[in-house]
Image (tube, rainbow, N blue to C red):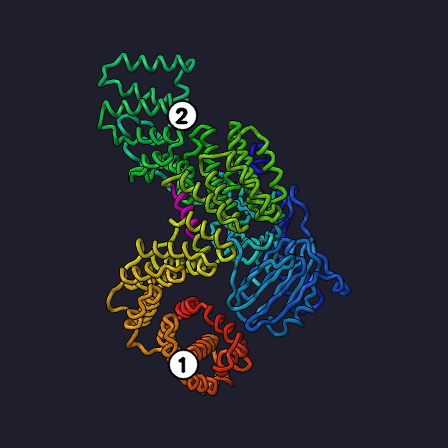
Amino acid sequence: VDVLAPKSDAAVYLPPGNAKLKATPLKPEPAIPAPQRQAIAAAAKPSQAKAEPSSSSPPPSQPTVAPTAAAAAALPAEGKLTRDGAVLRFAGAARLGSAVFLRGNTAWIVLDAAAPLDAARLKIELGNFPDAVEASSGGGLSILRLVLRTPEEIAAVAEGSDLKVTIAPQVTIAASAIGFSRNLDDSAHATMTTLLAGAGRVVTLLDPVAGDTLDVIPAAPGQAMAAENDYVEFRALKTASGLVLLPLADDLEVSVHAMRVTIARRQGLSLTPPASAIAGSPTVLARGEGGPSFLDFAAWQRSSRGSFLQAERRLRAAIVARKPEEANPARLALARFYLAGNFAAEALGTIDVMQAADPALQGDRHLRTLRAAAEYEMGRYRDASKELAGAEFDNDPHAAFWRGLIAAKLENWNQAQADLDRAAAVLHRYPAEWQGRARLAAARAGLARGRLELADAALTRLPPGLAPSLMIEAQLLHARLIAQENRDKDARALFAAVESGSDPHAAAEAIYARLQSGLAARTVSRARAIAALESLRFRWRGDALEMATLRTLSSLYFAAGRWRDGLHALRIAARSFPGEDDARQAEDDMRAAFVELYLHGKADRMAPVEALSLFYDNIDLTPIGADGDEMIRRMSDRLVAVDLLGPASDLLKYQIDKRLDGVARAQVATTLAGIYLMDGKAQAALETLQATQISMLPEDVGHKRLLIEARALAALKRTGDALDLIAVDKQDDTNRLRAEIYWQGRQWPLAGATAEESLGERWNAPAPLSAGDRSEVLHAAVAYSLANDEMSLERLRTHFAAKMAGTPDADVFAAVSARIEIRGTKFRDAAAQIASIDTLERFMKEMRTR
């Protein structure tokens, strides 16, 4: 059906079902037992008598019994038992139409245009799980029925080109729910429709158990009736794939055309009409039969005789001819004239004059509706929405008409659909242009909500003779509908036609939709989509399309690892639409990307300088609280690892000065002081610790601060103060620090003794020495040698010679622990090597580990 001229196809408006297939009695394969064959034949006879073909209907399709040798040409199918059920796999069937459902204890699998099925083989594979497996074929169908022992659930899903059917007590159905659109334009011929991808025909089958007929519409897998729905004339059965209807009226007609399923009766379906409006008292200035919210554009245009200028002069003269306090009725006529002629600003100005002349009209329902329509025409949709926000409009279908149009412009799709549904009963009272706008708004709402059947119904009911701009919009929405049915190839041609048209906004929207469809179908590469969207963001700006373009572009940038470009695109989106919901969503997207970068490790793949630059450029995105603190700590650690101590200390200082207090502030200050020490800024380290000192710190934090403060004092040549600070602390790491302070002060006897003391009984332990322990042994040996303490040096050799043998430091230990009288150049070289060891770096590493 051509959605741009929907009434040109007469078949759409004829009573549906002319091509409906008559009841197809299933002739079983020879493997089915004789009693079952008799039951099928008995159930088929009355249905065949009832369904005599009419002169306009094709003869009923008669299935043929496949010969026994047909098993060799059967559709490849396999059954497999699971822990609590069974799985059936049909090779290549995902490309076919299918209907999969349970009725009672019988599982039905109907495959359109499929080869026969081998029931005997499946029964062997499934064992005793089903009581019986029955297969039939004919009329281009293959039908499999499994009679189950106990009630089960069923699910169908496409896996590649195969159809996988699962039968078990509990299954997960991941298919999209099938919904119906109610078409009530002509109450005498009410119909229901739905879009069903892959649907090509209706097949009427006999259920040999229930003795009734089912209208089965096989469709592409992934579409199912989520729950059984009852209507007056039919029942829609729950399915795992496809659509199955149980007719409850003899003259029910079901047809399929271009994947649109139509359900009808010759005298129309019995559908509940939309709730009628509660009659409201007309306002003083609007007493028309449509109520105060009905804007009768057609009548207002007819009343303006002559040219526009002549009518305007006549209406203005009528205002001037009256007393100022009596001029409002004439002003109302002028406001209506302006609005009917699409002069919204002039209409709004006239209404302002009316309300200024009579303040009692501020709440007038008719004037508020006029204002809402004028605001809508001027693109001021939020202001228009406020005009109709009162509860007095809630049960008014004419107000619902305007509310629906406005909600669609604000992309409040659920509200738009609900309001336009309420307005359906009065839509015929509006000019064709406004009917078209409402239908297009309903189509957009259906597409946005994934209700393709509603979008399709709205497009097929467009009135003829629409303006070119609305025709192009309809063509665009039809292309989007085709794309959302996963028919990317067909949609591309339709999008191309819109892109080459004369409407720049529609062309830009078509480009965006085509790229979205191509990305979903994987026919457009990420790089190509990025290039096209980069061009599109400059081609069209200023509305929701620009926002959507920027957000999609940012997601593609992020996927390509272009984090700076992605954050920049989102920042533009947020700044360009301040206060909008989409702008707030763009800000949320930025924060989420920032967390991915600096909390979940994505920034670890970037060069350190680039990561730091990006962090500072977007530091306002740092989350408040523990996540933000952890993010900054991770960043500073990475900077320290690549020796960027200055930037690392700046980050932590910002935390201390701007973000933290209490224990958390003292902890971060401890890390900052250590970085200052590594950067040779001992005084800054000391000042940082003193400025953040608080009582009742956790023991481990207090101990770290003690060691760093002692190191800072030693670095400032305040050796005595450093030793006094740690005098009473006898922990191993404190002893090592004390030995280092003695070493730096060239107090060799004390340095050697303290280093050896810090090693404790490790010489006698079975575990090998760590790198830190070996360093202490070497420092002790050098100190004893420089102190000329041969006795202590001998004790050190005795204790640690075996432990040091075979380690990377074995040769160095042999050189520095040799007898004092024979030491020479080897000792000097080894001592210099030991003195160059960066004990501060080792100390900070231990601090971070702890």
Residue 488 versus residue 653 in the image, above or below? above
**Circle 2 residue:** 297
Residue 818 place in picture, x, y as percent = 50, 82
Could you tell me which secondary element the residue under label 2 belongs to?
helix
The crowding category of the residue bearing disc 2, from other C-alpha atoms within 10 Å (few below 14, some 14 to 19, many at least 20), is some
Please say whether residue 773 is visible from this viewpoint: no
Looking at the image, is 89 positioned above or below residue 565?
below
Q: Is residue 585 one of those drawn in magenta?
A: yes
Left or right placement of residue 252 versus residue 123 in this view: left
For mark 1, give the secondary structure: helix
- Residue 624 located within the stretch drawn in magenta: no
The numbered mark, 1 or 2, whose residue comes first in the sequence reads 2
| Residue at far front of view | 821
Q: x and y percent of residue 838 in the render?
A: 45, 67
Q: Compare residues 387 and 122 and report the one nearer the observer.
A: 387
Identify whether 630 is placed above or below 569: below
> Which residues are the magenta region?
580-592
Q: Which image quadrant: the C terminus?
A: bottom left
Rendered location of residue 558, percent (x, y)? 51, 50
Mark 1 — residue? 756
